[in-house]
Image: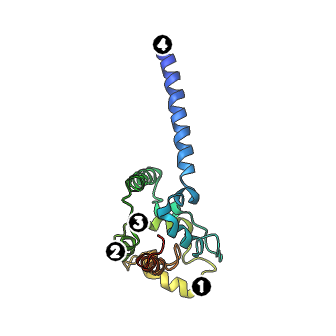
Amino acid sequence: MKKAFLGFILGAIVAGGIALFSAAQITATNHVSFCASCHEMKVFHETWKVAAHGPDKHRGAVRARCVDCHLPHEGLIKYLITKGMAGMSDFYAHMTGKMATYQEWLEALKDPERKVKVYESGCRECHKELIGNGVPLKAILAHRAYLLRETDKTCISCHSTVGHGNIRAVLAQKIKQNKQGGEL
């Protein structure tokens, strides 16, 4: 009985340590600086900084981090599973040199089933009141079909530039520079 109790206490301490370490890693990897630490993300970091939800041109809009848009906000389990899978995929691609090229990113942005997902639940986490007090009539009417689920449009269908500005034009310019011998 004494050995079982000591085993339980030791197990609880180890489990608690693992939980605290995991929580610290989840928090550390939620920062924009972590996402931007890979050179492949440089263009996305630069375009985010000057977009509506970035820190440089903050115009009253919500300041969003990468995880606010690119991870689901429909529960902790889904969030953690998606974060883990995306993180492992990005880490593998980075370490093996198999990250998407600017051309591949540009093609992916044309695809409705985008390579990099933007989650509606992330938009709605911050933008809960689409038709509340202070919302202009024009915005209320524009969101009516969305709220009544009378359209297949998503937030990004109409608000495609809030996260990274005109990322398509920036990627096209980077492709052009690359073809002319410029840097990636």
Q: Which quadrant of the view contains residue 147?
A: bottom left
In the rendered structure, which disc, 1 or 4, sits on the residue that comes first in sequence?
4
| The residue positioned farthest toward the front in the image shown | 181
Element under disc 3: loop
The vertical placement of 147 against 67, above or below, is below
Q: Which residue is mark 2?
A: 111
Q: Residue type at mark 3?
A: Val
Between label 1 and label 2, give the one nearer the viewer: 2
Q: Residue type at mark 2?
A: Asp
On residue 3, the disc is 4
Element under disc 1: loop
The image shows residue 100 at horizontal and vertical percentages of 38, 65
In the rendered structure, which disc, 3 or 1, sits on the residue that comes first in sequence?
3
Q: Residue type at mark 4?
A: Lys
Between 97 and 30, which is closer to the camera in this rendering? 97
Between 26 and 88, which is closer to the camera in this rendering? 88
